[in-house]
Amino acid sequence: MAFVIPEVGEIQLLEDLQANRLEGSHMHAYKNDVAPGPATVLGDFTECNFAGYAPFPLVGWSPAALDGTGHAATNAPKATFTPTAVGGSGNVYGYYITDDADGSLIGAERFSDAPVTVAQFANLEVNHTFTTKSEF
């Protein structure tokens, strides 16, 4: 038989993850053509460096709850990246999240319509939901 984590266990595990890794983590935008997968490492990404760019601190995640598919989920605060120079952002392919304590990679996502380009003073807004279900 397979090991099963009941719904209450998923919520507890996600709450622990929130408290110890997600709260205070940072979202980074990346500018190289990478499709994240199970073997992805932090060095695979080239972080954006357009004028006005800074990694976005993820503070204030929503409480862990079941998401309707039987998995625990939490939502990050909406991350915003705003280019301030005439050239805008250049190509942005996606984002990755790092642990604030040690800088390690937590996860990444490529935008479905990558690459995207953001004009000067326009916002690139990213909504992120973290669940206990892997996409792989």
Image (tube, rainbow, N blue to C red):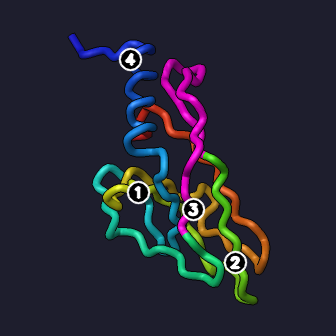
Residue 14 picture location, percent across and down: 43, 30
Q: CA distance from mark 3 to mark 4?
A: 30 Å
Q: CA distance from mark 1 to mark 2?
A: 23 Å
Label for residue 100? Answer: 1
Quadrant assignment, res 7: top left
Label for residue 83? Answer: 2
Q: Which residue is tagged 3?
A: 56
The furthest residue to the top: 1
The three-letter amino acid code for the residue at tag 1 is Asp
Discs 3, 2 touching: Cβ within 8 Å: no
The three-letter amino acid code for the residue at tag 3 is Phe
Q: Nearer the viewer, mark 1 or mark 4?
A: 1
Asked if residue 25 lies left or right of residue 122, the reply is left
- Which quadrant: the N terminus? top left
Mark sitting earlier along the chain (1/2)? 2
Mark sitting earlier along the chain (4/2)? 4
Q: Residue at x 44, y 66 (%)?
A: 34
The three-letter amino acid code for the residue at tag 4 is Gly
Residue 67 picture location, percent across and down: 58, 24
Indicate yes or no whether the magenta region holds residue 58: yes
Question: Helix, strand or loop at disc 4?
Answer: helix
Q: Which residues are magenta?
A: 55-76
The image shows residue 134, relative to residue 128, as above or below, that is above
Label for residue 9? Answer: 4
